[in-house]
Amino acid sequence: MKKAKKERKRCKRHPEKFLVRKCFRCKREICSSCAKKKFKHFFCSNKCSYLYLLDNFKKSLRKKKIYKDPLSYPLLRVLFFMFFFLFVISIYLLYKKPTIEMKEYFIKKILVKEKEVRHFYDGSIKRFNTDKKEIYLTFDGGNYAQRAEVILDVLKENNIKASFFLTGEFIKKFPEIVKRIIRDSHEVLNHTYSHPHLTTYEINGRNFTRKDITPEKVFGELFRTEEIYEKLTGRKMDYIWRAPYGEENKEIIRWASRMGYIHIRWSFDFLDWRSVEDYKKRLKEFFKIRDKRGYILLLHLGSPENDTADYRVFLSHLIKELKNQKYEFKKISEGLRKVYY
């Protein structure tokens, strides 16, 4: 008797076709339409073909023992030592990071024939280089002036001349005070017109030039103050200035120097714009300094507090102690004149 032929199964997805192959991975029977040829084999689906590839990769890893001993694999060994080397270098650079040193700028002696010539100087003068016991009182004037009369009285009583850095707005607001400063033979210097923030110091603690600050802006601030002062007093202002809030950098100072301006900073700030407690505390700290030759002292014509009585005592005590230590009081222009002429 003849053997009965096996019935050929048909594909469920393609009923017109017979199951003629098996998936290389899962061994499932497939028709010619279902067969996916990948990686030199036939599979029932793309998923099955990629799973086959993954299984093959895992087998090769086990064979090379990368899981148990990764550094036995040459490429991984090279990568490991590269990353380890970069890690060591980064730790070293962090440990040896560069530090920014604060530098004091002193004026060099320059011979100038004519006194009307404007001088160009890129640095900020923090202290005058002198062997004599000379000290420089400077007062900034912006929005407040309630101490002005007291300050001028104390200076007159002690026969002392000082330098006043005033804004253009201050000169417009307090013209009589400005006239008295001139009558008493003090000097008025430039503190810009509107006392603007020139750098980003109040935002991030860095003296980067603000986006809205340009050379034209700086020129305008200084020139407007010159004009107002000359209109009020009939005199020309010396080319000496101080940046508001002490916010300045080399770029801004260079812009001002194109107009011939020299920037004056300070050696010691009494913080008298804050409170009575602050400047009393700073006064004690100031007298602990042994060598104060050429020091430029920063004081203010006013503050939000009504402290005229306390300020009279404070200023009188400061002047008395400095006189006892044989210090002679000078104006900023006198300090510059010794160097430039």
Image: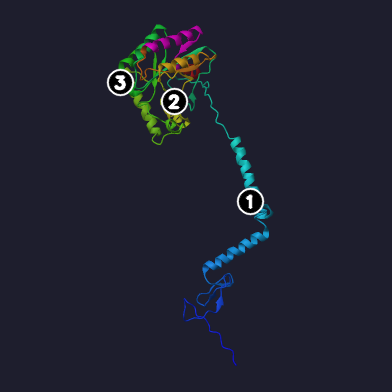
Q: Residue at x 37, y 9 (%)?
A: 153
Give the mark, 1 or 2, whose residue is nearer the N terminus.
1
Disc 3 secondary structure class: helix
* 311 falls in the magenta region: yes
In the rendered image, the residue lying farthest to the bottom is 1
Q: Nearer the viewer, residue 216 or 337?
A: 216
- Hey, what amino acid is under mark 3? Lys
Q: CA distance from mark 3 to mark 1?
A: 71 Å
Question: What segment is highlighted magenta in the picture?
Answer: 309-334
Horizontally, residue 3 falls left or right of residue 317, namely: right
The mark tally for this picture is 3
Q: CA distance from mark 1 to mark 2?
A: 51 Å
In the picture, residue 72 is in which quadrant?
bottom right
271 to 84, vertically: above or below: above
Dot 3 crowding, Cα within 10 Å, few <14, some 14–19, many 20+: some
Q: What residue did someone put label 2 on?
A: 246
Residue 151 location (% of width, % of height)? 38, 12
Which residue bears the numbered disc 1?
79
> Is 35 drawn above or below residue 164 in the view shown?
below
- 230 part of magenta stretch: no
Q: Residue 229: x, y in percent?
A: 34, 21
Quarter of the image for the N terminus: give it: bottom right
Residue type (three-letter) at the residue carrying disc 2: Gly
> Closer to the camera, 21 or 183?
21
The residue nearer to you, when weighing 159 against 314, is 314
For the residues labelled 2 and 3, the Cα–Cα distance comes to 23 Å
Label 3 vs 1, first from the N-terminus = 1
Residue at far front of view: 1
What label sits on residue 173 in the rendered view?
A: 3
